[in-house]
Amino acid sequence: MDFDATLNKSMRYMKEKVGNNYKIAFLTICGIHFGLRISDLLRLKHKDLTGETIQLAEKKTGKARTIRINDTVKEAYALYVSKMVHVEPEDFLFVSQKKSPFSIRQVNRLLQESYGAKNKNISSHSLRKTFGRRVWDRDNNSERALIMLSKLFNHISTSTTRIYLGIQQEEFDDVYMNL
């Protein structure tokens, strides 16, 4: 997923007057800005977005994580809440029309419907990778970015992060193309 194109499409969905695309759009915005696994995104509650940071223990690793909430996410959250009738701080952020939290399968289906393209498989994991690629690109493909991402993703090494983000394959491809 391209970060800018995905963000722009998501913000358009957030501003639409009809439909339920705003729910998956807001989840997408959070996903590409926070870099969390889908299991952690789905556990977020409204109270988690009322301050300047999110504090959580990652479900998979149990490690503590602090995420600063930027202005884009705050703006999207304001739009999100404006479309709801009633919000309680303890309510989960991402719920279906039946008021139950989204399942991972449901999220993947909605992402594919809203953001997928022919021959391109989009899933909840694409959001985390999009976050990683954005950090990597914004820091001019630096080793520093890989070190930060490796720590944020709880990878054993930067080489794992290179593989995860597809950077290593791109480097291999460059070797072949530059002969």
Image (tube, rainbow, N blue to C red):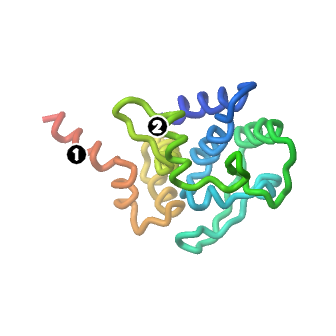
Q: Going 59% across and 42% down the picture, which residue do you hit?
A: 28
Labels 2 and 1 touching (C-beta < 8 A) = no
Q: Which mark is residue 172?
A: 1
- Between disc 2 and disc 1, the foreground one is 2
Whether residue 43 is situated above or below residue 1 in the rendered picture:
below
Q: What residue is pinned by disc 2?
A: 1
Query: In the image, is residue 9 above or below residue 136?
Result: above
Query: How far apart are labels 2 and 1 at the CA level?
Result: 21 Å
Q: Which amino acid does the dot numbered 1 rest on?
A: Phe
x, y percentage for residue 99?
A: 73, 52
Residue located at (39% from left, 49% from top): 165
Local packing at callout 2 (Cα closer than 10 Å; few below 14, some 14-19, many 20+) is some
| Residue closest to the eye, 91 or 144 | 91
Q: Is residue 132 left or right of residue 33?
A: left
Q: Amino acid at mark 2?
A: Met
* Mark 2 or mark 1, earlier in chain: 2
View extreme (left): residue: 179
> Looking at this view, is 7 or 41 the one in front?
41
* Residue occupying the far bottom of the picture: 62
| Count of residue discs | 2
| Residue drawn where x is 51% and y is 42% of the image | 134
Quadrant of image for the C terminus: top left
Residue 77, by quadrant, is: top right
Dot 2 falls on a residue whose secondary structure is loop
Give the x, y percent position of residue 51: 82, 54
Q: Residues within 10 Å of mark 1 (few under 14, many from 20)?
A: few
The picture places residue 118, in percent across and down from the top left corner, at: 37, 29
